[in-house]
């Protein structure tokens, strides 16, 4: 069985969704479910974002009508993240364009399959939400990818850009409008769903006639 997760590496709910999916997969394996391959698909929350290192808090304040409202939103998602063992540090996060990050993830899948891609996805999430890494900076992306086992990434070679653009377009074509969106076969659910809801998605797909 394949689960495709449409996400962006700067989406706080996507990292939470990753943890909840992992919880669901543990439950799935415990009840004897079939093997599951998880593949990460690209989505850009802000395709026009720059990667100049502007603090995320400033961008959030501008978008949501002031620093107080932005702080409330970040505090809420930080509390939810803590429930699944994640320690968000929004005070260090910086605004970034994520197109190159999606290229790195595509290369990870191409070179090492779902397992390597998942490791790189995890490293990028941690880099952004915990360490304040600028995921729009190519040197930073190369270093984080190497940490996860994807060595020798040369982002000056842009031959994979069209592949990522095609995947972005496919996501829009199938109705992905928010992330994370979890797709299994022809079924999908949007949002950082509870583990039980994701488990139900797996069960529902498995019960369908093949």
Image (cartoon, grey):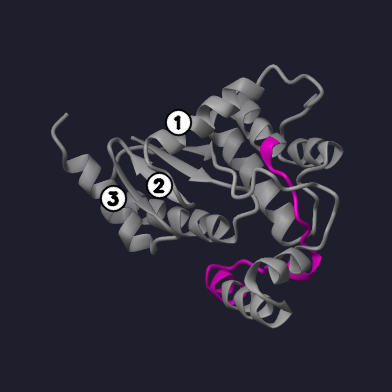
Label 2 or label 3, whichever comes before in sequence order: 2
Give 105 or 122, whichever is nearer the viewer: 105
Whole-Å distance between the Cαs marked 3 and 1? Answer: 21 Å
Is disc 2 placed on a helix, strand or loop?
A: strand
Label 2 or label 3, whichever lies nearer to me, is 2
For residue 182, which numbered disc appears in the image? Answer: 2
| Residue at horizontal 58 percent and vertical 28 percent from the top | 165
Q: Is residue 134 above or below residue 175?
A: below
| Residue at horizontal 28 percent and vertical 50 percent from the top | 201
| Residue at horizontal 66 percent and vertical 21 percent from the top | 160
Residue under pointer 3? 201
Query: Which span of residues is magenta-colored?
Result: 78-99
Q: Residues within 10 Å of mark 2 (few under 14, many from 20)?
A: many
Farthest residue toward the top?
Answer: 159
Label 1 or label 2, whichever comes before in sequence order: 1
Residue under pointer 1? 170
On screen, residue 120 versus residue 203, left or right, reads right
Residue 78 figure quarter = bottom right
């Amino acid at each position: 069985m394949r689960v495709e997760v449409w996400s962006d590496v700067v989406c706080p709910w996507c990292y939470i969704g990753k943890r909840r999916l992992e919880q669901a997969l543990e439950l799935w394996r415990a009840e004897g479910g079939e093997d599951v391959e998880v593949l990460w698909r690209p989505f850009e929350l802000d395709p026009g974002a720059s990667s100049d290192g502007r603090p995320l808090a400033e961008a959030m304040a501008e978008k949501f009508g002031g620093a107080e409202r932005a702080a409330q939103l970040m505090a809420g998602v930080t509390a939810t993240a803590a429930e699944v063992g994640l320690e968000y540090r929004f005070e260090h996060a910086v605004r970034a364009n994520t197109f190159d990050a999606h290229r790195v993830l595509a290369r990870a899948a191409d070179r090492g399959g779902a397992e390597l891609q998942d490791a790189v996805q995890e490293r990028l999430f941690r880099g952004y939400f915990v360490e304040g890494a600028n995921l729009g900076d190519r040197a930073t992306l190369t270093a984080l990818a190497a940490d996860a086992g994807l060595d020798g990434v040369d982002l000056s070679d842009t031959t994979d850009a069209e592949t990522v653009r095609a995947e972005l377009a496919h996501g829009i074509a199938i109705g992905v409008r928010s992330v994370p969106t979890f797709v299994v076969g022809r079924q999908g659910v949007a949002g950082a769903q509870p583990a039980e809801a994701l488990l139900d998605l797996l069960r529902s797909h498995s019960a369908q006639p093949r």
